[in-house]
């Protein structure tokens, strides 16, 4: 078994720029140049963000000529989905309570 990722998924998705990069890559694989076109931050910063995403195994890269092409690896997001889904029961309960309160209000 390989070494543990340097960054965990939660650290990786904590940054809004990295979340936006993941969203971009969910539409299509992209080169660093293509990714840079969507951000106002430097190419160096983009590469650092991509390295964090790569360390967390959320993206992979491959060489295509002189470029690196990045691809989303969504499997790692299952951990986040499972964690968040636990809390849905509380949201559903609060919404049900609100609905009940609204429906029970007397009409003036």
Image (spheres, grey):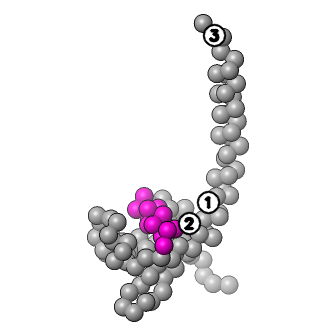
For label 3, the crowd category at 10 Å Cα-Cα, with few meaning under 14, some 14 to 19 and many 20 or more, is few
Q: Whole-Å distance between the Cαs marked 2 and 1?
A: 8 Å
Q: Nearer the viewer, residue 60 or 10?
A: 60
> Mark 1 or mark 3: which is in front?
3
Would you name the residue on which mark 3 appears?
107
Residue at the outermost top position: 108
Within 10 angstroms of label 1, few (less than 14), some, or many (20 or more) residues? Answer: few
Viewed as shown, does residue 61 lie left or right of 41?
right
Q: Looking at the picture, does residue 6 appear above or below residue 41? A: below
Residue 19 visible, this angle: yes
Q: Quadrant of the N terminus?
A: bottom right
Residue visible at 60% across and 65% down?
A: 77
**x, y (%) of residue 93?**
70, 36
Residue 92 vs residue 66: left or right? right
Residue 34 magenta-drawn?
no
Contact flag, marks 3 and 2 (Cβ < 8 Å):
no
Q: Tell me the magenta residue range.
A: 16-28
| Distance in Å between CA atoms under marks 3 and 2 | 49 Å
Cβ atoms under marks 2 and 1 closer than 8 Å? yes
Residue on which disc 2 sits? 9
Screen quadrant of the C terminus: top right
Which residue does the image show at 41% across and 84% down from the upper left? 68
Q: Earlier in the sequence, mark 1 or mark 3?
A: 1
Please name the predominant secondary structure of the magenta segment in the image.
Answer: helix
Q: Which residue is mark 1?
A: 80
Q: How many marks?
A: 3
């Amino acid at each position: 078994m390989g070494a543990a990722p340097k960054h965990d998924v939660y650290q990786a998705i904590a940054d809004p720029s990295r979340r936006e990069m993941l969203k971009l890559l969910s539409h299509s694989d992209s080169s660093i140049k293509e990714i840079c076109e969507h951000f106002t931050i430097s190419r160096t910063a983009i590469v650092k963000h991509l390295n964090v995403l790569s360390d967390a195994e959320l993206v992979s890269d491959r060489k295509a000529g002189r470029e690196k092409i990045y691809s989303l690896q969504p499997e790692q997001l299952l951990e986040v989905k499972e964690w968040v889904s636990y809390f849905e029961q509380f949201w559903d309960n609060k919404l049900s309570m609100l609905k009940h309160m609204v429906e029970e209000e007397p009409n003036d």
